[in-house]
Amino acid sequence: MTILITGATNGLGAYLATQLVKAGEDVVAHGRNPERLRRLSEELGVSTVQADLTDLSQVDRLADEISGRFDRLDVLVNNAGIGTGPDPSRREESADGIELRFAVNYLAGYHLTRRLVPLLTASAPSRVVNVSSAGQQAIDFADPQLTKSYDGGRAYRQSKLAQIMFTIDLAGELREAGVTVNALHPATLMPTTMVREAGRRVMSTLDEGGSAVLRLITDPEPAPVTGAYFDGTARSEPDTQASSADARGQLRTLSEALVATALDRRAG
Ligand SMILES: NC(=O)c1ccc[n+]([C@@H]2O[C@H](COP(=O)([O-])OP(=O)(O)OC[C@H]3O[C@@H](n4cnc5c(N)ncnc54)[C@H](OP(=O)(O)O)[C@@H]3O)[C@@H](O)[C@H]2O)c1
C-alpha cells in the first residue's frame, strides 16, 4: 500500500513511518524541514515530500506533487500538528493570516485531503485517517479564529474538533466511492515534542497511540467503518457540536472561504 503520513519527521508520525516500513508498506513521508526529511529518507528508505502547512499555497503545491508523482494513494494520514505552544496566551497567525492552530491542525489537512480526493477515489478501497484528539471544544462561529479572547488550549481543542467534523462530512460524501474517513484520539499525553513543550506529564507510550493509528491504517477489520471517531481503539462520541449538520455546514463554508482567499491572495 502507498501511505502518505503528514508530519512524519517527529513524534507519532515518525513512529508510524518506522512501523509501516518494517511491515513492508510504501511510505511517503511528509515534513516541513528538508534536512529532517533527508535524514528520514536515509534512515528508512522512504519517499519524501516537503511543505510548510502554515502556507496554503504550499499545501496546494504538495497536492499537485503527490498527484503527479504517485500512481495511487491507499491511505492518507493527516497527523501533522502543533500543540498549545510554549506560551498558550500568545495568539499566532499562519503565513495566510489565519489563526495558527486552526490553520495547521485543521485547514491544511482539509485542503490537502480535498485536493487528493481524485487520487484516493481512483485507488479505492482507500482510507483517510485524521489524527485528532480527545481534547475538543465547540467552535465559536461568532469568532472562530479567537481574535477577541485567545487561549492556546481552546485554539487547539477547536482545531481538533474541526478535524472530526470534517471527517463526518467527507465520509458521507465518499461513502459510495469506497473511501473511508475516520478520526481518532491516539492516546493521552505521549512523549512527543508538543507534550514536552507544554510541560505536561507523559501518561502514554508511543506504542499505545501508534498501535491505535496503525489499526485504522492497515487492519482489515475497521475498514468498512466510516465517519467514526475512536478514542484509542474504542468507538467513541466526539463533542456534541460534531453531530450538528448546521455547525458542520458553517465550518465547511468558513473553510472554503479561507482557502479561496488565501490562494487568491497568493496568486494575485
Ligand atoms: N502527543 C500526544 O499525546 C497527542 C495526543 C492526542 C493527539 N495528538 C496528535 O497527534 C499528532 C502528532 O503529534 P505529536 O504528538 O507526534 O507531536 P510532535 O512530535 O510535535 O509532531 C508534530 C509533527 O507535525 C509537524 N508539523 C508541525 N507544524 C508543521 C507545519 N507548519 N508544517 C508541516 N509540518 C508541521 C512536525 O514537524 P517537525 O518534525 O518539523 O517539527 C512534526 O513532524 C497531532 O495531530 C496531535 O494533535 C498527540
Image (cartoon, helix red, strand yellow):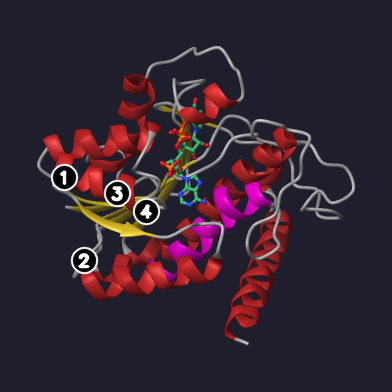
Q: Position of residue 72 (x, y in %)?
A: 21, 66
Q: Earlier in the sequence, mark 3 or mark 2?
A: 3
Looking at the image, the residue that sits furthest to the bottom is 268
Asked whether residue 215 is in view, the answer is no
- State the mark number for residue 89: none
Q: Earlier in the sequence, mark 2 or mark 4?
A: 2
- State the mark number for residue 42: 1
Q: Residue at x 37, y 65 (%)?
A: 176
Say whether residue 122 is left or right of residue 191.
Answer: left
Quarter of the figure with the C terminus: bottom right
Tag nearer the camera, 4 or 1:
1
Is 92 placed above or below 124 here?
Answer: above
Can you identify the residue that label 2 sits on? 72
- State the mark number for residue 180: 4
State the CA–CA distance, disc 3 to disc 2: 21 Å
Q: Position of residue 60 (x, y in %)?
A: 46, 71
